Image (cartoon, rainbow, N blue to C red):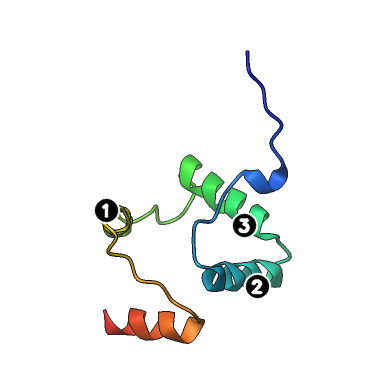
């Protein structure tokens, strides 16, 4: 059997822009968590379905569309939070 050592930071990988990752890290720190701890918490909440209300179907559809767009190379990159917020306000 193959075994591998996994560090705490390997639990959840954030495949996002560095700007968004820094924003998430800052938000996690305001609640006394590391980015890895935030990822584990969100992952656990999703898997155990303890979120109330549960993840809306519209959000799941948005995630599926984002994954499809990423695979097709249609994704949008942001260099700062202002660009991201302006884009979100435009949709």
Query: Is residue 69 toward the left or the right of residue 23 in the image?
Result: left
Quarter of the image for the C terminus: give it.
bottom left
Mark 3 is surrounded, within 10 Å at the Cα level, by few (under 14), some (14 to 19) or many (20 or more) other residues, namely some
Give coordinates of residue 82: x percent, y percent: 46, 86
Residue for badge 1: 68
Residue for badge 3: 38
Query: Is residue 30 toward the left or the right of residue 55 in the image?
Result: right
3D distance between C-alphas at marks 1 and 3? 25 Å
Name which of mark 1 and mark 3 comes first in the sequence.
3
8 versus 86 height, above or below: above
Name which of mark 2 and mark 3 comes first in the sequence.
2
Query: Is residue 4 toward the left or the right of residue 84 in the image?
Result: right
The residue located at (40%, 56%) in the rendering is 53
Q: In front: 74, or 50? A: 74
Name the element at disc 1.
Answer: helix
Mark 1 is surrounded, within 10 Å at the Cα level, by few (under 14), some (14 to 19) or many (20 or more) other residues, namely few
């Amino acid at each position: 059997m193959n075994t591998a050592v996994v560090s705490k930071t390997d639990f959840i990988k954030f495949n996002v822009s560095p700007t968004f990752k820094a924003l998430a890290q800052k938000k996690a720190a305001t609640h006394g968590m590391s980015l890895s701890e935030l990822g584990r918490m969100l992952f656990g909440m999703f898997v155990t379905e303890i979120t109330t209300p549960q993840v809306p179907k519209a959000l799941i559809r948005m995630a599926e569309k984002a994954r499809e767009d990423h695979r097709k190379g249609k994704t949008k990159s942001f260099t700062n939070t202002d660009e991201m917020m302006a884009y979100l306000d435009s949709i």
